[in-house]
Amino acid sequence: MKKWILVLGIVMLLIGVSLYVYSGLEKPKINENSFTVKGTEYISKNISVNSKNFIISVTNPTSSSGLVPARDVNRVNNTSTLAKLSLPTYTSFGNIKEYRNLTSANYAFVEFSGSNPATSITYGPEGYLVYIGYLGDISTFLILIGIVAVIAGGLLNNNFKLRDF
């Protein structure tokens, strides 16, 4: 009997789901998706950057958006002043803008939109965000391998053989 494969699969599933839940519980500490609204201008809460190894990652930003030093937020009143005052992205791919190598200061993400944007801002020290990413990757891997092991263990425990077909 291959009952140990089934048990191993269940244990992997439990550990994978636990890690997934834990990484999900950690994200709200670094996630921001509430904005102050001034007409068509949406302004995030201030993001306090206190180290060089800090990342601000913005998902689903509008085309008229950017990261602005908090001291300049009141000067942003249209898309042209936003373009002048916003900081360049470190990298931009797909629907994500990423800002790195920022000086220690307060920043706000500003965007212009006709409706409430679906923008999400994740920020924190680089090491912490990498840690959360690895937790997500490991949990996904364990869940997938756990499912395969449970199926294999279940089939082997039932003495399933291909020649029976």
Image (tube, grey):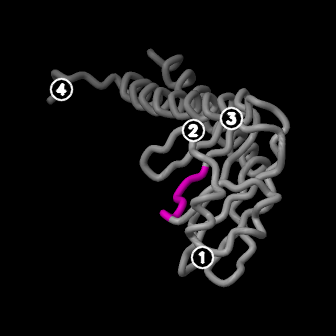
Q: Which residue is mark 1?
A: 116
Whichever of callouts 1 and 4 sits on the residue coming sooner in the sequence is 1
Q: Name the spot of residue 85 as percent of width and height, x first.
A: 66, 57
Q: CA distance from mark 3 to mark 2?
A: 16 Å
Q: Nearer the viewer, residue 129 or 64?
A: 64
Q: Name the spot of residue 65 as percent of width and height, x first.
A: 57, 62
Q: Which residue is mark 3?
A: 129
Which type of secondary structure does the marked residue at label 4 adopt? helix
Q: Which residue is mark 4?
A: 164
Could you classify mark 4 by the number of other residues whose Cα lies within 10 Å: few (under 14), some (14-19), or many (20 or more)?
Answer: few
Which type of secondary structure does the marked residue at label 2 adopt? loop
Whichever of callouts 3 and 1 sits on the residue coming sooner in the sequence is 1
Could you classify mark 3 by the number of other residues whose Cα lies within 10 Å: few (under 14), some (14-19), or many (20 or more)?
Answer: some
Q: Residue at x 76, y 34 (%)?
A: 125
Could you classify mark 2 by the number of other residues whose Cα lies within 10 Å: few (under 14), some (14-19), or many (20 or more)?
Answer: some
Q: In this picture, which residue range is highlighted in magenta?
A: 58-63
Q: CA distance from mark 1 to mark 2?
A: 26 Å
Could you classify mark 1 by the number of other residues whose Cα lies within 10 Å: few (under 14), some (14-19), or many (20 or more)?
Answer: few
